[in-house]
Image (tube, rainbow, N blue to C red):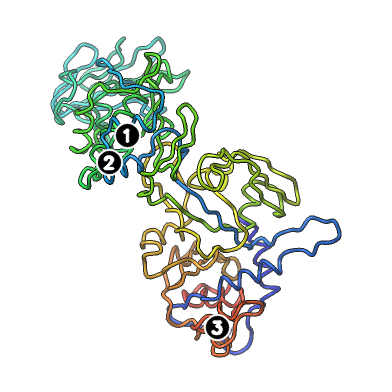
């Protein structure tokens, strides 16, 4: 978060809020015209906020100064790019075998004999396990009737306390102890029908195979044991897009199945579970996301894995490489298929305050990329970034910078100011679940994405988020309107129709550019001469934010 106290106080000092007639008016909620001259306005803020140099003192950048970060791809970029695989399948007709050969250089296709997976179900950490099955089950060598529930609590020594009830939480039918801490389906074979799957009490989440418990120190853990392909039926649709099969991308799904099977076969995380169910491993939610199109991809590649020296390889993948893979265990390669990706190129606007806060350096003075990996455009992925502030200097890797700035990837460039020809903003939510894709979105960004982003009636953004008067909330202007967020009102969307009514001297402003702005930047809607505080007050009035915040 930027220093809102400082930036709000500065804005009030430079652009004092209006007083006199009209200031205290209450109006019904109205539409607001976004400022066509905001880029020029923000540029003026940047210039005003830079301390004079020439005395040997490092310049400080005003907290509200915008910085445009342009980048490529989504994720770490190692191994296969999922969007690139789709592009090669759809546009170039590549088969799955050719796709994986392209991304995983040095590995060869091999066959994995029938194997079992054990998956830690992290959502049930530190709790007993309670399950049932529509077809019945078995525990401690005894049958469990259809609909009867079993609760297992792990005990020292590898066993479990067992309680069987009539339905979840019902009458106790019997209880005891088991050396074998597992609830088994009526048939332990692979690829069994849905009525035989075990289901969690409470959520009804269904899982193929067996469910059991273990202790991790003193902490209870729940584990799903099942055949590898049964596991992949849940993984592949969670990690990719089943609908790709309907648009020429079926081979990309087959490539995903091969990569996911290889990754799974290389896993060996815990004594009680080889892998987990989150993005730290591969996303897995039991049968919830199974889809016939991805199930076919798994079945048609049965047993196929990638191997080196006779061992399965950790076949990493990410959503989008941005046009070039990052290297690592596999040689870096150009990824022309990635041109189809919605995050092939992206941009995001942050402020100097955001950057300084992310790295804990006080007031921002400079930010500079110091090293890259030399694979791809712009010198490739960032391997070194230096952020200098009034309280110190942070030298970080590109991976750390990506995390702190919440960027789509570590392949980026930083430019002070707004970049007119920047690519579209990065989507606020990950489009695929591959590791490394999580991005936190502000309420304003989330609403903008929900409405359709640049393709919506709001159009393109005109600068970074700004503070409402009295720090009551934040807002962001777009070519076709404004999105406002306050704790009391939540997220509000206002279109661009009547800003002139809310801004003083709007008629004159319509014919004159803002001070220090190029005439071409003046807005035809009469807001070119508005200051930060006046604009903020107009937005607050439009959505009826109380004067006291």
The image's mark for residue 99 is 1
Q: On the rendered image, what quadrant is the N terminus found in?
A: bottom right
How many marks overall?
A: 3
Residue placed most toward the observer, 206 or 47: 47
Q: Quadrant of residue 14?
A: bottom right
Give the side of residue 452 with respect to residue 149, left or right: right
Residue placed most toward the observer, 187 or 290: 290
Q: Position of residue 294 (x, y in %)?
A: 23, 36
**Where is 321 relative to 509, above or below?**
above
Give the side of residue 342 with respect to residue 27, left or right: left
Q: Secondary structure at mark 1?
A: helix
Q: Which callout, 1 or 2, points at the residue further toward the start of the chain?
A: 2
The image's mark for residue 89 is 2
Residue 235 visible in image: no
Q: Secondary structure at mark 2?
A: helix
Give the side of residue 302 with respect to residue 411, left or right: left
Q: On the rendered image, what quadrant is the C terminus found in?
A: bottom right
Residue placed most toward the observer, 296 or 22: 296
Q: Nearer the viewer, mark 3 or mark 2?
A: 2
Give the side of residue 204 with respect to residue 448, left or right: left
């Amino acid at each position: 978060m930027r220093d809102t106290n400082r930036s709000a106080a500065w804005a009030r000092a430079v652009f004092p809020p209006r007083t006199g007639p009209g200031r205290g008016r209450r109006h019904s909620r109205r539409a607001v015209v976004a400022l066509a001259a905001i880029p020029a306005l923000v540029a003026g803020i940047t210039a005003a906020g830079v301390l004079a140099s020439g005395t040997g003192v490092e310049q400080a950048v005003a907290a509200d100064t915008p910085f445009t970060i342009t980048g490529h791809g989504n994720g770490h970029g190692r191994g296969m790019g999922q969007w690139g695989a789709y592009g090669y399948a759809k546009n170039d007709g590549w088969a799955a075998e050719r796709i994986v050969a392209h991304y995983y250089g040095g590995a060869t296709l091999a066959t994995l004999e029938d194997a079992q997976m054990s998956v830690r179900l992290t959502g049930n950490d530190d709790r007993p396990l309670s399950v049932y099955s529509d077809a019945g089950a078995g525990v401690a060598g005894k049958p469990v009737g259809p609909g009867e529930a079993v609760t297992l609590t792990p005990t020292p020594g590898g066993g479990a306390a067992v309680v069987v009830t009539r339905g979840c939480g019902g009458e106790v039918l019997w209880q005891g102890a088991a050396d074998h801490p597992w609830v088994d389906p009526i048939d332990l074979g692979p690829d069994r029908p849905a009525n035989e799957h075990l289901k969690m009490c409470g959520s009804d989440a269904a899982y193929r195979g067996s469910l059991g418990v273990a202790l991790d120190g003193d902490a209870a853990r729940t584990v799903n044991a099942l055949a590898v392909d049964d596991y992949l039926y849940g993984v592949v649709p969670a990690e990719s897009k089943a609908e790709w099969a309907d648009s020429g991308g079926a081979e990309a799904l087959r490539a995903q199945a091969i990569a996911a099977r290889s990754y799974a076969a290389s896993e060996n995380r815990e004594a009680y579970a080889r892998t987990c169910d989150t993005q730290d491993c591969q996303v897995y939610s039991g049968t919830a996301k199974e889809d016939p199109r991805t199930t076919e991809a798994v079945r048609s590649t049965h047993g196929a894995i990638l191997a080196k020296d006779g061992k399965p390889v950790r076949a990493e993948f990410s959503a989008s490489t941005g046009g070039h893979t990052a290297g690592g265990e596999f040689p870096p390669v150009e990824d022309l298929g990635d041109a189809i990706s919605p995050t092939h190129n992206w941009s995001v606007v942050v402020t100097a305050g955001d950057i300084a806060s992310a790295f804990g350096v006080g007031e921002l003075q400079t930010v500079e990329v110091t090293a890259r990996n030399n694979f791809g455009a712009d010198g490739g992925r960032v391997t070194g970034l230096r952020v200098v502030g009034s309280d110190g200097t942070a030298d970080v890797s590109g991976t750390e910078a990506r995390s702190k700035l919440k960027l789509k990837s570590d392949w980026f460039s930083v430019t002070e100011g707004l970049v007119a020809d920047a690519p579209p903003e990065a989507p606020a939510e990950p489009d695929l679940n591959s590791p490394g894709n999580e991005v936190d979105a502000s309420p304003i960004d989330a609403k903008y994405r929900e409405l359709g982003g640049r393709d919506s009636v709001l159009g393109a953004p005109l600068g970074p988020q700004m503070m409402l008067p009295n720090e009551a909330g934040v807002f962001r202007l777009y070519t076709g309107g404004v999105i406002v967020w306050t704790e009391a009102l939540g997220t509000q969307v206002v279109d661009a129709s009547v800003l002139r009514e809310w801004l003083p001297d709007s008629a004159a402003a319509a014919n004159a550019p803002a001070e220090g702005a190029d005439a071409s930047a003046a807005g035809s809607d009469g807001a070119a001469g508005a200051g930060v505080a006046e604009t903020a007050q107009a937005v607050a009035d439009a959505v009826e934010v109380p004067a006291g915040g």
